[in-house]
């Protein structure tokens, strides 16, 4: 009885830290970023010319536009993929939280190029045939004592968001932008398919081109994370 009484004051804090640590680990391990890294590290890195039909593989190259590229909403950079989020900090008097008020994602088909070899990547959003993780490299914010820049104000107006509250105070807002810029080196994994070209591609002299596609069981994987190493030998 003495031992139980002596240990019990330490047991509850210990259990608390174990549970918190377990939650943090599970959240990290099953995050989109870590799942993509684990999947890509198991796939062979191949040159486009060595791709085989119906083979799941990964390829790293420069993203090039097939048609008129997208324009990132804030930075105005030309891209083939962008994800933006606008969040507002809300308070109920007891606690504060960030609420997402805009989450916009736009994609288009694009080429991957390396050493003058090309592969086509076709993306669909309805239904979504890919999973992705892009590094947010453009961030802006505003707050009570931090007025939004004219560029940020213009962006907010495009999404019908007022930068000031009813009482005239600046709202606490933050914006993140992640893109695949034209010419940026990225990694894509998918099912390889060789297709006949319907129209010539400048700088590409072959009659067929590899396409990376999704399947019923395997979505395309897209990321601009650098230096994802392959753990297995092939």
Image (cartoon, helix red, strand yellow):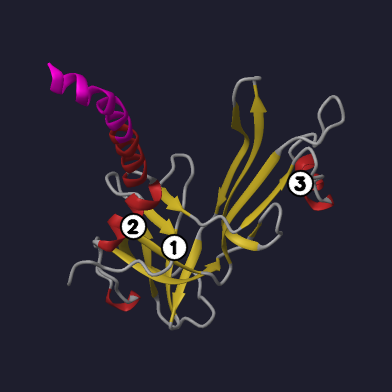
Q: Position of residue 174 (x, y in %)?
A: 67, 43
Dot 1 or dot 2: first in sequence order is: 2
**Numbered circles on residues, count:** 3
What is the number of the mark on residue 225?
Answer: 1
Q: Viewer-proximal residue, 36 or 214? A: 36
Residue drawn where x is 76% and y is 41% of the image: 156
**What residue is pinned by disc 2?**
37
Characterize the local packing of mark 1: few (<14), some (14-19) or many (20 or more) Cα atoms within 10 angstroms. Answer: some
Nearest the eye: 147 or 183: 147
Identify the residue shown where x is 36% and y is 45%.
Answer: 28
Residue 68 seen from this side: no
Residue drawn at (65%, 25%) of the image: 91
Which structural element holds mark 2?
helix
- For the residue pair 74 and 108, the one nearer the viewer reads as 74
Question: Where 85 falls versus 44 (above or below)?
Answer: above
Give the CA separation, mark 3 to mark 2. 33 Å
Q: Position of residue 224 (x, y in %)?
A: 47, 62
Report which residue position mark 3 lands on: 155
Residue 55 vertical position relative to residue 155 in the rendered view, above or below: below
User: Mainly helix, strand or loop, the magenta region?
Assistant: helix
Secondary structure under tag 1 reads loop
Judge whether residue 219 can be spotted in this image.
yes
Could you classify mark 3 by the number of other residues whose Cα lies within 10 Å: few (under 14), some (14-19), or many (20 or more)?
A: some
- Asked which secondary structure carries label 3, the reply is helix
Q: Which residues are magenta?
A: 1-17
> Magenta includes 224?
no
The C terminus, quarter of image? bottom left
Q: Is residue 226 left or right of residue 16?
A: right
């Amino acid at each position: 009885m003495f031992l139980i009484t002596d240990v019990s004051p330490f047991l509850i804090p210990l259990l608390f830290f174990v549970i918190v640590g377990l939650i943090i680990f599970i959240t990290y391990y099953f995050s989109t970023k870590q799942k993509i890294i684990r999947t890509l590290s198991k796939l062979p890195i191949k040159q486009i010319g060595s791709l085989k039909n119906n083979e799941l593989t990964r390829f790293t190259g420069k993203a090039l536009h097939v048609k008129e590229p997208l324009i990132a909403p804030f930075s105005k950079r030309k891209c083939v993929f962008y994800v933006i989020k606008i969040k507002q900090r809300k308070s109920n008097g007891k606690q504060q939280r960030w609420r997402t008020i805009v989450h916009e994602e736009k994609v288009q088909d694009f080429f991957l190029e390396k050493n003058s070899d090309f592969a086509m990547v076709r993306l669909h959003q309805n239904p979504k045939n890919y999973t992705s993780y892009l590094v947010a490299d453009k961030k802006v914010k505003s707050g009570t004592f931090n007025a939004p820049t004219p560029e940020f104000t213009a962006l907010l107006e495009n999404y019908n968001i007022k930068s000031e509250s009813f009482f005239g105070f600046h709202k606490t807002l933050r914006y993140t932008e992640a893109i695949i810029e034209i010419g940026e080196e990225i990694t894509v994994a998918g099912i390889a398919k060789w297709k006949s070209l319907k129209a010539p591609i400048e700088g590409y002299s072959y009659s067929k081109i590899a396409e990376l596609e999704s399947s019923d069981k395997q979505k395309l994987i897209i990321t601009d994370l650098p230096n994802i190493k392959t753990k297995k030998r092939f």
